[in-house]
Image (tube, rainbow, N blue to C red):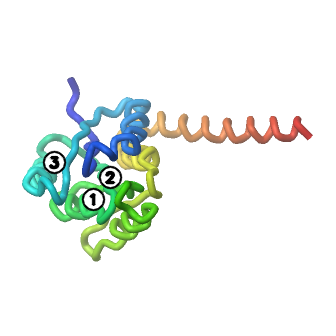
Amino acid sequence: MSTARVGIIMGSNSDLPVMQAAADILKQFGIVYEIDIVSAHRTPEKMFEYAKTAVDRGLQVIIAGAGGAAHLPGMIASLTPLPVIGVPVKSSNSIDGWDSLLSIVQMPNGVPVATVAVNASQNAGILASQIIGCSDKGLLKKIMEFKEALKDKVNAASDEMKRMK
């Protein structure tokens, strides 16, 4: 089995329905990933170990989803040299996801976390793929085909709408 290139982590199993879209798009692009629950507040030792060993395990990007106070993406970013993509999750204890979004985007200089929209883990998976695609021509080709298919889908919908007039 190939080594995972992307790590997908989340604060609790209740985040999985949101984070599954990141896994699905990575699978579509043929990128091997690992997925786990790593809580910044309930399992801080596991979080430190995960971040500190990510490079040695072969990861190239980490996608971290978190709701509420959403410390996971920023803490992971503070512990690893890898790019981290934060996914704010609208969870049962969040304020429509705004608290999570604001927590993730307000990182101090020197500890960047790329951030996608609330619950937009598919975009996090696409961004992780694009980051890896910078040095992987085969993957870059798949991303270009994906984007072309998006354009084709919009053009087909536009044509359909024009026919309905």
Q: Which residue is mark 3?
A: 55
Q: Which residue is mark 2?
A: 65
Q: Position of residue 34 (x, y in %)?
A: 24, 37
Q: Position of residue 143 (x, y in %)?
A: 48, 39
Label pair 1/3, CB-CB below 8 angstroms: no
Could you tell me which residue is drawn at 17 percent across and 60 percent down? Answer: 41
Real-space Cα distance between discs 1 and 3?
16 Å
Q: Position of residue 27 (x, y in %)?
A: 38, 31
Of residues 127 and 40, the one nearer the viewer is 40
| Type of amino acid under label 3 | Val
The first of marks 1 and 2 along the sequence is 2
Of residues 103 and 90, the one nearer the viewer is 90
Could you tell me which residue is drawn at 11 percent across and 44 percent down? Answer: 56
The first of marks 1 and 3 along the sequence is 3
Q: Is label 2 in a helix, a strand or a loop?
A: strand
| Type of amino acid under label 1 | Pro
Label pair 2/3, CB-CB below 8 angstroms: no
Could you tell me which residue is drawn at 39 percent across and 40 percent down? Answer: 17
As drawn, 155 above or below 77: above
Q: Which residue is mark 1?
A: 73
Label pair 1/2, CB-CB below 8 angstroms: yes
| Type of amino acid under label 2 | Gly
Quadrant placement of the C terminus: top right
Badge 1: few (under 14), some or many (20 or more) residues near its Cα, within 10 Å? many
Q: Is label 3 in a helix, a strand or a loop?
A: loop
Q: Residue furthest top?
A: 1
